[in-house]
Image (cartoon, rainbow, N blue to C red):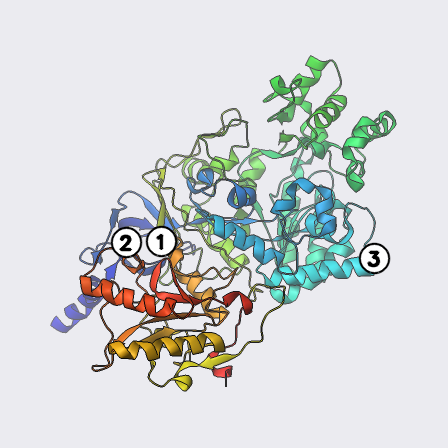
């Protein structure tokens, strides 16, 4: 019996011996898998979940921080499969406050348009976006890295926008692409998939997306199939031809050899509401036949897009929308088509009726007072019909005019939520309520909290565990996101702590800029972005990439010297080595090199030898920690380093001087004892003690640091501003970034 008691107590004893950065105690753990909740403790170390135990088993463990989650649910962070935060992260407010305060920890972008691929054809459509476009075969990767460099509170990734892809091959022209144009599109798909895109995302009611034929979409789908891509679509119709549009999406997936996801599934317009059970049956039948199909949705009866969605698609061809609106004859033709219901395109004003069309923001002086009004009200005030009014507004504003369309059914929403293949997305970007002025869709602030409060707690449409699964793990599995979407040991620490009794959305259509209630704490990669309901201003988010991602160095243009890497110990055997990255004795605790060797470009190596020889007069020698470093290792360093510590590692998007063979990490050693001398900090220490101008430490430590610096500077090296041990050789710009592993160097 005593042995049994000891065995039962052993897990708790072992847990108590560990040291963690964070322990979340006594919460109701819903792990995202769909399993029933349990009372448990969750421990975090670095950016990962280290332990999950029954409640109370971590009460004695050492922890830098403890959070009592009693009365709260502890769940994985929510994954927004349809985000529009790309400009917020790239050039705006990367805190995306409206998103993280509803529990979102990962955002997936790409519906219809993306910042890459880009070329002269895409730039010609809107020159004002040129600075936000990324050209070249690695443009998609450079776009993701540009967002990463700016910083985000959420993780983020993207599909390829099919409208951008279409424009890449054919601009704003209609018609089938030529063989050469189609091949250029397929090559762009392959490049983007290797850069980490999750697949292709179409938006087939918007030009130039809707200029693409079914066959064109099948061909581009085939290009992404070998990379594990997904075809996700805002279908050609969500209304009168809803069922036919589903057939098209399924055909693209089946013939293209890829899974199919349907964006914001709905039946638009009251006359189409009875079609949702038929749509669900069609998806279920496709799944029964072996077609991998699913959908996502938002929890509102109103959708949001531009007022241009009420215009015939041909009116925007070749970028001539505003010219057409200013031409009386063309305008007459447009109006005649807008008044009909038997057209092939989707007229959202007709489906919603003018009374169900809410204009969010108008900027021109003559129209500003109509912001927040219904299209029917504006038409009455102007003494015109709704069609003339809509065209006037678009022409005066010279933009698409953000609009909300009330066209879905509440009963259908509940039926859709119950489907096992359903997932969720906001179809919105992140907003800061403190500075927002114009109306926006409330889903920007409350989509996920509305699901938890209204549809789980109040209306009991689905159990909490099923809702959490659809918000997290279901999306992660669909996108092949590794180690996200579930609370389990070894997974990234994307965690939400919320009160199931109070969680609810507060944003409304007329007062949207209100953050949700009940989301108490949110952690992204182990870093708090929300504490006690308030944003911490932290931006620990990282790039997430699709399964076809192929890590590679950045493409460089120009003339470079031939690479001539020399092994240091072969030039001077008195240079000692302590290659930390060939061991686990480094900042990451991982082995990165298969061999303990050190190389530099020949001029840098020879300069290092001269410095070593001169130091012998002082009874000292050089001990090298690292020299040339393959680019792939630099990328691994970047990926495992928290955002706030990245001043100590190189950004792989621009490469490191180590990758060029012109940087060396080193210290001094005493020739008599063979031991390293004292320095103000240890190697790889990510603190201010590592700074070369740090004024702390002992007199001896600072003296040793200065001896090293002078010896290196005398031979053409410069110390890095954040690390006393890191020195760059003067000619580093003359060499290309390298990615050759040590074992391939003779």
To which quarter of the image does residue 663 belong?
bottom left
- Label 2 environment density (alpha carbons within 10 Å; few <14, some 14–19, many ≥20): many
Residue 22 tag number: 2
Q: Earlier in the sequence, mark 3 or mark 2?
A: 2
SS of the residue at dot 1?
A: loop
SS of the residue at dot 2?
A: strand
**x and y percent of residue 290 in the render?**
64, 62
Point out the image quarter for the N terminus.
bottom left
Of 232 and 107, the residue lying toward us: 107
Query: In this rendering, is residue 44 above or below 301?
Result: below
Of 722 and 346, the residue lying toward us: 722
Residue bearing mark 1 = 526
The answer to the question of whether label 1 and label 2 lie on touching residues, with beta carbons closer than 8 A, is yes
Of 726 and 410, the residue lying toward us: 726
SS of the residue at dot 3?
A: loop
Q: Is residue 493 left or right of residue 616?
A: right
Query: In this rendering, is residue 736 above or below 238?
Result: below
- State how many labels appear: 3
Residue bearing mark 3 = 178
- Label 1 environment density (alpha carbons within 10 Å; few <14, some 14–19, many ≥20): many
């Amino acid at each position: 019996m005593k042995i049994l008691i000891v065995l039962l107590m052993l897990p708790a004893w072992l847990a108590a011996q560990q040291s963690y950065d964070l322990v979340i105690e006594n919460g109701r753990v819903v792990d995202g898998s769909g399993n029933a909740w349990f009372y448990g403790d969750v421990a975090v170390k670095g950016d990962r979940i280290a332990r999950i135990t029954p409640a109370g088993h971590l009460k004695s463990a050492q922890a830098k921080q403890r959070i009592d989650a009693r009365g709260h649910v502890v769940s994985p962070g929510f994954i927004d499969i349809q985000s529009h935060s790309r400009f917020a992260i790239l050039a705006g407010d990367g805190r995306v406050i409206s998103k993280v305060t509803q529990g979102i920890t990962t955002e997936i972008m790409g519906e219809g348009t993306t910042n890459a691929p880009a070329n002269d054809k895409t730039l010609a459509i809107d020159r004002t976006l040129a600075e936000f476009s990324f050209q070249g075969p690695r443009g998609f990767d450079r776009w993701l890295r540009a967002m990463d460099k700016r910083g985000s509170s959420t993780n983020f990734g993207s599909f390829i926008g099919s409208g951008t892809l279409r424009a890449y091959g054919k601009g704003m022209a209609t018609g089938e692409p030529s063989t050469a144009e189609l091949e250029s599109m397929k090559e762009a798909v392959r490049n983007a998939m290797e850069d980490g895109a999750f697949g292709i995302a179409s938006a087939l009611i918007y030009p130039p997306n809707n200029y693409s034929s079914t066959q064109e979409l099948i061909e581009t789908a085939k290009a992404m199939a070998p990379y594990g891509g997904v075809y996700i679509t805002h279908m050609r119709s969500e209304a009168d031809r809803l069922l036919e549009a589903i057939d098209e999406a399924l055909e693209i997936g089946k013939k293209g050899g890829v899974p199919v996801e349907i964006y914001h599934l709905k039946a638009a317009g009251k006359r189409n509401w009875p079609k949702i059970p038929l749509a669900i049956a069609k998806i279920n039948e496709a799944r029964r036949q072996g077609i991998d199909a699913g959908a996502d949705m938002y929890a509102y009866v109103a959708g949001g897009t531009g007022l241009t969605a009420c215009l015939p698609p041909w009116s925007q061809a070749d970028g001539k929308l505003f010219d057409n609106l200013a031409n009386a004859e063309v305008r007459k033709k447009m109006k005649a088509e807008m008044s009909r219901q038997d057209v092939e395109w989707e007229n959202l004003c007709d489906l919603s009726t003018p009374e169900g069309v809410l204009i969010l923001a108008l900027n021109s002086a003559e129209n500003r007072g109509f912001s927040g009004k219904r299209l029917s009200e504006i038409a009455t005030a102007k003494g015109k019909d709704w069609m003339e009014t809509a065209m006037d507004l678009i022409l005066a504003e010279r933009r698409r005019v953000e609009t909300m369309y009330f066209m879905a059914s509440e009963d259908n929403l509940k039926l859709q939520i119950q489907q096992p293949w359903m997932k969720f997305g906001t179809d919105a970007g992140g907003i800061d309520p403190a500075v927002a002025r114009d109306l926006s869709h409330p889903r920007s602030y409350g989509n996920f909290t509305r699901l938890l409060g209204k549809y789980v707690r109040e209306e009991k449409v689905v159990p909490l565990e099923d809702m959490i699964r659809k918000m997290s793990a279901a999306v992660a599995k669909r996108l092949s996101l590794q180690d996200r979407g579930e609370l389990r040991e070894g997974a990234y620490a994307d965690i939400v702590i919320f009160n199931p009794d109070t969680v609810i959305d507060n944003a409304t259509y007329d007062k949207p800029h209100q953050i949700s209630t009940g989301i108490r704490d949110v952690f992204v990669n182990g870093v708090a972005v929300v504490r006690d309901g308030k944003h911490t201003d932290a931006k620990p988010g990282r790039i997430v990439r699709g399964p076809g991602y192929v890590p590679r160095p950045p493409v460089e243009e120009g003339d470079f010297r031939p690479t001539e890497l020399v092994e240091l110990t072969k030039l001077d055997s008195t240079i000692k080595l302590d290659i930390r990255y060939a061991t686990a004795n480094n900042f990451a605790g991982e082995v990165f090199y298969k061999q303990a060797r050190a190389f530099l470009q020949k001029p840098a190596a020879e300069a290092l030898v001269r410095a070593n020889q001169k130091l012998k007069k002082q009874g000292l020698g050089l001990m090298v920690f690292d020299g040339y470093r393959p680019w792939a290792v630099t990328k691994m360093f970047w990926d495992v380093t928290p955002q706030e510590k990245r001043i100590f590692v190189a950004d792989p998007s621009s490469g490191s001087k180590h990758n060029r063979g012109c940087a060396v990490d080193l210290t001094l050693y005493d020739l008599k004892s063979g031991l390293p001398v004292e320095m103000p900090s240890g190697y790889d220490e990510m603190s201010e003690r590592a700074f070369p101008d740090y004024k702390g430490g002992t007199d001896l430590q600072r003296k040793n640091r200065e001896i090293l610096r002078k010896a290196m500077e005398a031979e053409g090296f410069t110390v890095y501003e954040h690390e006393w041990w890191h020195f760059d050789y003067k000619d580093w710009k003359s060499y290309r970034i390298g990615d050759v592993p040590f074992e391939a160097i003779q």
